[in-house]
Amino acid sequence: KPYKINYIEEKKSLGTVGSLAFVKKKITSDFFVSNCDTILKINLNDFYDYHKKSNFLITIVVATKNFKLPYGSCELDKKGNLKQITEKPNSNYLVNAGLYLMSPKVIKFLKKNSPMDMDQLIKIAKSKKQKIGVYPISEKNWYDVGEWSEYNKLIFNQQ
């Protein structure tokens, strides 16, 4: 398909979604918002279908992320006594991968020339009882190139 891309130059920083208020009359269908420091391997058609079928106002791509603590972790009771120790625990999280699919209805939550980040928009939408969904992907399909360690990992793994 031929796609039309609009660029907005901000006079002051408006956050991840604040500048969308400038194009509110042009947004008439669901649209993608992407952070510029992420690279994803994702089937956008599947993502779009999931968003539409689930009837979400906003769908967030999340990556599974496993963190292994290289130390024993101590859990204390309310009195400060050792409750238990877990040696080198693993924790799994669903982390925001920086790609969103949104209904044009989100635009009503934005004000022109008013800064807003994605987490603020999501909080507002949640407070209005709107449906927010997540689309999980493997951490192997997400690269946060805004972090030097991740950027270097991507560059050196591609060679």
Image: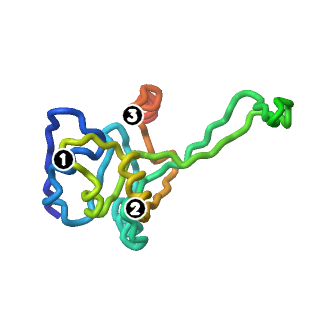
Residue 64's tag is none
Residue at 32%, 59% in the rendered image: 102
Mark-to-mark CA distance, 1 and 3: 30 Å
**Coloration mode:** rainbow
Q: Residues within 10 Å of mark 3 (few under 14, many from 20)?
A: some
Q: Residues within 10 Å of mark 2 (few under 14, many from 20)?
A: few
Q: What residue did someone put label 3 on?
A: 145
Mark-to-mark CA distance, 3 and 2: 33 Å
Residue 125 relative to residue 138: left or right: left
Residue at 38%, 32% in the rendered image: 146
Mark-to-mark CA distance, 1 and 2: 20 Å
Q: Disc 1, disc 2: CB below 8 Å?
A: no
Residue at 40%, 61% in the rendered image: 128
Q: Position of residue 155 (x, y in %)?
A: 40, 31
- Observer-nearest residue: 58 or 33? 58
Q: Position of residue 66 (x, y in %)?
A: 61, 42
Residue type highlighted by circle 2: Lys
- Observer-nearest residue: 48 or 134? 134
**Numbered disc total:** 3
Residue type highlighted by circle 1: Lys
Residue type highlighted by circle 3: Val
Q: What residue did someone put label 2 on?
A: 128
Which quadrant holds residue 106?
bottom left
Pointer 3 or 2: first along the chain? 2
Q: Where is residue 65 in the image (x, y as percent from the top left)?
A: 56, 44
Residue 112's tag is 1
Q: Is residue 115 above or below residue 82?
A: below
Q: In which quarter of the image is the C terminus?
A: top left
- Mark nearest the camera among 3 and 2 is 2
Which quadrant holds residue 45?
bottom left
Q: Is residue 36 above or below residue 20?
A: above
Secondary element under disc 1, as helix, strand or loop, is loop
